[in-house]
Image (cartoon, grey):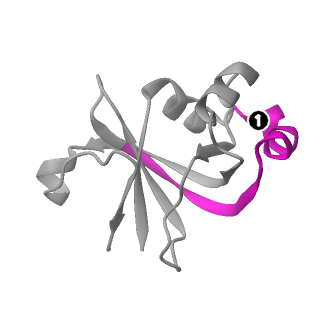
Amino acid sequence: MKVLLSIKPKYAQQIFDGYKRYEYRRSLFKKEGVKHILVYASSPIKRIIGEFEILNIIYDDIEKLWEKTKVYSGISKSAFFTYFSNKDKGYAIEIGRITKYENPIILDKHYGITPPQSFAYISQ
């Protein structure tokens, strides 16, 4: 099983450039067995541009999460803490092997769904 995440194009590109090695989330999918993340680059791209393997998921206090992941966060400290405002804990998905698609996928045509606000499960 895979999970589809909507990610801003700037951060999606950083993932495929190898610069961003953690994807942050305020909440996370609950089903077990998720091994891969499909990356949906939001507007203006509006396509699934690739996927990555999940190496690890870190759940920790926000301060500790930043200290553990800041070197490869791909975002500024202020953006990190703004994203997690009003949260005591958060998730960092550690990015493993990445695959960038040669031909990005149009979400609704291929899967028949609209872009998720947070995530969507994809059975393949």
Residue 21 occupies which quadrant of the picture? Answer: top right
Q: Circle 1 sits in a helix, a strand or a loop, which is it?
A: helix
In this rendering, the answer to whether 38 lies above or below 101 is below
Highlighted magenta segment, given as a residue range: 49-73
Q: Check residue 18 for magenta coloring.
A: no
Can you give x and y, in whole percent of width and height, for residue 101 in the image?
39, 45
In this rendering, the answer to whether 100 lies above or below 3 is above
> Residue 87 or 34: which is nearer the viewer?
87
> For the point 61% across and 44% down, which residue is it?
23
> Where is the N terminus found, in terms of image quarters?
bottom left
> For the point 20% across and 44% down, which residue is it?
106
Q: Is 36 situated left or right of 96 in this image?
A: left
How many numbered discs sit on the rendered protein? Answer: 1
For label 1, the crowd category at 10 Å Cα-Cα, with few meaning under 14, some 14 to 19 and many 20 or more, is: some
Can you give x and y, in whole percent of width and height, for residue 5 in the image?
42, 49
Can you give x and y, in whole percent of width and height, for residue 114 in the image?
19, 48
Q: Residue tagged by mark 1?
A: 72
Residue 52 occupies which quadrant of the picture? Answer: bottom right
> Residue 6 or 45: which is nearer the viewer?
6
> For the point 75% across and 23% down, which residue is it?
77
Q: Check residue 67 for magenta coloring.
A: yes
Can you give x and y, in whole percent of width and height, for residue 71 in the image?
83, 33
> Residue 73 or 47: which is nearer the viewer?
73
> Where is the C terminus found, in terms of image quarters?
bottom left
* Residue that protrudes farthest toward the front in the picture: 86
In this rendering, the answer to whether 82 lies above or below 54 is above
